[in-house]
Image (cartoon, coloured by chain):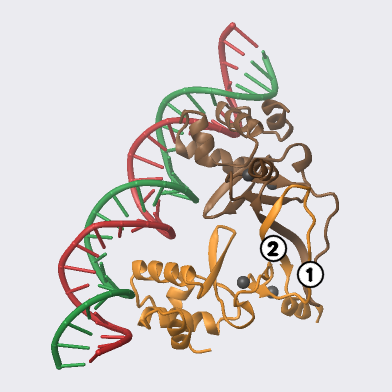
Chain colours: A brown, B orange, C green, D red
Amino acid sequence: MKATHILQHHQLKCTECRIGILNVLLEADAALTENQVKEALHNKFDRTTFYRSFKTLVETGVLHSITLHDSTLYMVNAGENAGHEHYHFYCSACHKLLCIHPQKKENIALPDGFKIKQTDITFEGVCKTCNKTEKR
Amino acid sequence: MKATHILQHHQLKCTECRIGILNVLLEADAALTENQVKEALHNKFDRTTFYRSFKTLVETGVLHSITLHDSTLYMVNAGENAGHEHYHFYCSACHKLLCIHPQKKENIALPDGFKIKQTDITFEGVCKTCNKTEKR
DNA sequence: CAATAAATGCAACGATGTTGCAAAATGAAT
DNA sequence: ATTCATTTTGCAACATCGTTGCATTTATTG
Ligand SMILES: [Mn+2]
Ligand SMILES: [Mn+2]
Ligand SMILES: [Zn+2]
Ligand SMILES: [Zn+2]
């Protein structure tokens, strides 16, 4: 997926900052913080610009975020992530936050009277990769 | 449950600030932010003292917290909450965050290789009370 | 009540969220 | 390619929150 295509599809101007953010996140194998992206781009942009870019990208649905352990992590809504509800998995070994798309959606039962509009599920544990490494 | 009993049980000094925080949270019917508790106590204590009190109370397991919509909410680990994993429900009508203890624990299936240590589940929707009110 | 350890209040600083505004960049139209 | 309207950017400024050091006050124990 190309950064410029994503931006155009959302009717957003293709600015250097937005393209940079998207490229970093598209290549990442896990969610990243604003500062991690900023550093990956060698602090090329002002922090206000960064702040506003992330805000716009989340509001328009280009990115989604999750807050974990007092820091906010961002991911691109591309491919499987686009629109679909999914789980998040934080690996306490490699400290990566991963999006997980399960085969089947679970249906959690709540007491009578509660109307559920959205469900957020976050796991903490050891990821597939780290488990393999440990077993060797 | 008495605030002083809880503090003594955790080998914490019964200071005015801690007792105040606990009393406010014990009487609340939903989770509260640090500032909400602070205001309930008429800003009697310095914000540093407040900050350190919450930190201590969470670290020792007297309270637990959840971050939702960029704000951190606190609840007492008393009664049903004590030790037990439970769900959290945010009502978009009354804006309350509630702890929910389900009858049976669901078991969510993840792809092979992922070892789960902890699961956090947060719902968003309309709570029991607000649903009743709406239907009238 | 006296002694000791812990908690508090205050000052200070860093990180982060947020806004206003002038300068620069973008995208569309010529 | 040049022009123009609109959006984005960078910078300054301010608010809030997290965090620490340190002197003073408080809680607990004997
Ligand atoms: Mn995700
Ligand atoms: Mn809870
Ligand atoms: Zn891992
Ligand atoms: Zn409600």
Any atom of ligand 4 within 8 Å of the CB at mark 1?
no
A130 w.r.t. B3: above or below? above
Q: Quadrant of residue B121?
A: bottom right
Q: Is residue A50 left or right of residue A104?
A: left
Q: Nearer the viewer, residue A22 or A130?
A: A130
**Residue A70 sits above or below residue B98 on the image:** above
Residue B21 image offset from top left, x and y in percent: 45, 78
The 10 Å Cα crowd at callout 2, few under 14, some 14 to 19, many 20 or more, is some
Q: Residue at x 65, y 36 (%)?
A: A29
Location of mark 1 (residue): A115
Residue occupying the point 78% across, 63% down: B107
Label 1 close to label 2 by CB (< 8 Å): no
Could you tell me which chain the residue with mark 1 belongs to?
A
- The residue where tag 2 is placed is B121
* Residue A16 in the figure: left or right of residue A39: right
* Residue A47 percent coordinates (x, y): 46, 38
Q: Mark 1 Cα within 10 Å, few/some/many (few <14, many 20+)? A: some
Depicted B5 relative to depicted B39: above or below: below
Q: CA distance from mark 1 to mark 2?
A: 15 Å
The circle drawn on residue B35 is none
Hey, what amino acid is under mark 1?
Answer: Lys
Q: Point out residue B128 in the picture as x, y percentages from the top left corner.
A: 75, 77
A112 left or right of D18 in image? right
Q: Nearer the viewer, residue A22 or B82?
A: B82
**Amino acid type shown at disc 2:** Ile
Q: Residue furthest right?
A: A104
Residue A75: x percent and y percent? 65, 41
Question: Does residue A51 show up?
Answer: no
Say which element carries label 1.
strand
Asked which secondary structure carries label 2, the reply is strand
Q: In this orientation, which residue lies closer to the viewer: B8 or B47? A: B8
